[in-house]
Amino acid sequence: MKDTFRLIIVDLLGTEGGFANRSRKADPGGPTNLGVTQRTLSAWRGRAVSVEEVKRLSREEAIDIYRAQYWDAVKGDKLPRGLDYAVFDCAVNSGPARAVKILQKILKVKVDGVLGVLTLAAVKAHSTTALINLFSAARLKFMKRLKNWPYNKTGWSRRVRHVQERSLELVNNAIIKRAPTPDLEPHENEEGSKAVDEETSALSAWLSPDGITKGAMAASGFSGILAGSGPVQWGFAIALVISVGVAGYLLINKERAA
């Protein structure tokens, strides 16, 4: 088994920090300790856990969760040294499926969020250094599309840059320096905030700039049609309602896929 996980786990815990419970707007992960959210800990233990239990999470259990739920999920032991760290850190921050999808888009293979034989074969055909740089740029691009980017842009940018530098060090077989032991006091930590997709509701989609523009155009056109009378005008009105509905459906899907 590779030694990368052992080398980077303390570094990761230092980045994630201790207990935090920021607003949902800033961090959709909710109550989090050592980077492990309340939802993740509940799934790991097979039952609902309290905020207090999240606060008491031990480093040993957190490390077990990271290895099983994130490192193994992105097949860290099979990825080249250095790239394994970059993908793993992204998995912790944004979920294993998202991390793999970012990698697959770079490799131009089927994007399904599962790191299988074809994806691993494509990885071997590329320079590890180049993949780390491309992955880091794509990861940051993904983060910038998230709703909570304005709250975390400084910390996330610093995190991606830090992981990129560490990953490149590992490619050159350097032993990365151990990060300081994370404090266990509550604090605001931008770097540890989760960069994950959130479910997009119909209302939030229509309240987006694109949605507002479409709504205004529809209202203007509909009022103009109603100013007239007769079957032709009403036929246009019905067609407009249908087209607005289709546009709304496509808009919601677009927002969710972003």
Image (cartoon, helix red, strand yellow):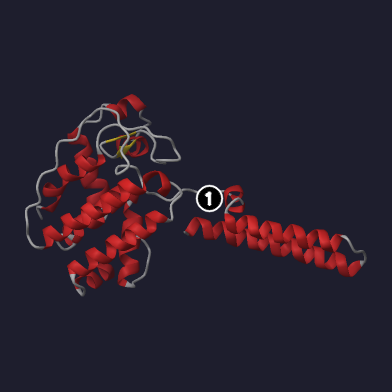
Element under label 1? loop
Which residue is at 20% across, 75% downward? 125
Mark 1: give few (<14), some (14-19) or many (20+) Cα within 10 Å.
some
Which residue is at 71% across, 61% downward? 217
Which residue is at 39% across, 34% downward? 22
Image height check: is 31 above or below 1? above
Mark 1 is on which residue type? Answer: Thr
Does residue 142 appear in the picture of this structure?
yes
Tell whether 130 sits left or right of 252.
left
- Closer to the camera in the image, 154 or 9: 154
Q: Give the percent coordinates (x, y) of residue 225.
A: 84, 63
Kindly give the residue lying farthest to the front in the view shown: 154
Kindly give the residue lying farthest to the bottom in the view shown: 125
Considering the image in quadrants, where does the N terminus appear? bottom left
Residue 11 location, quadrant: top left
Tell whether 216 sits left or right of 60.
right
Does residue 116 appear in the picture of this structure?
no
- Closer to the camera in the image, 104 or 164: 164
- Which residue is label 1 attached to? 200
Image height check: is 185 above or below 226? above
Q: Give the percent coordinates (x, y) of residue 148.
A: 43, 46
Q: Give the percent coordinates (x, y) of residue 182.
A: 19, 35
- Closer to the camera in the image, 227 or 91: 227
Residue 83 location, quadrant: bottom left
